[in-house]
Amino acid sequence: EERDEDGSKVERHFVRRYTIPETVKEDTIESQMSPDGVLTVKAKKLELQSSSRTIPIQCATGQKRPIEDAPESEKPTSKRSRKGKK
């Protein structure tokens, strides 16, 4: 900011640093300062690749079929212990 006071010049400035998240596309960063001093920073996020995938499950007989269609004897059972529950 600059202004004249009694023929003299006054200049003030400050520095503030912000950390931009790593999930931001650096080439899309835009900033704008409003007349009343509000700084707005906008950027697009990086597109994250999905790390999930589908893995088919084969029965011991070699046939592929959903668990819902399998006979009760072939359905997996949970072997979790239920300690403390009666």
Image (spheres, rainbow, N blue to C red):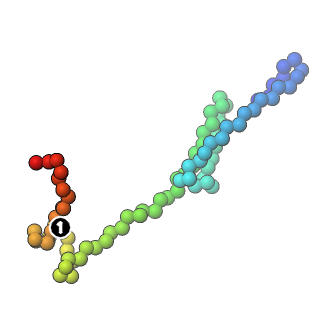
Q: Secondary structure at mark 1?
A: loop
The percent position of residue 33, horizontal first and vertical second, equals: 66, 37
| Vertical order, 17 against 63 (above or below) | above
Q: Nearer the viewer, residue 67 or 84?
A: 84
Name the spot of residue 6 as percent of width and height, x first: 87, 17
Query: Which quarter of the picture shows residue 66?
Result: bottom left
Residue at the (71%, 37%) spot, across then down: 15
**The quarter of the displayed image where residue 12 is located:** top right
Residue at far front of view: 84
Residue 6 position (above or below residue 29): above
Residue at far right of view: 7
Q: Is residue 71 left or right of residue 29?
A: left
Residue drawn at (65%, 29%) of the image: 36
Residue 39, quarter of the rendered image: top right
Q: Residue at horizontal 25%, vertical 73%? A: 57
Q: Position of residue 83 (x, y in %)?
A: 18, 51
Give the labeled residue for mark 1.
76
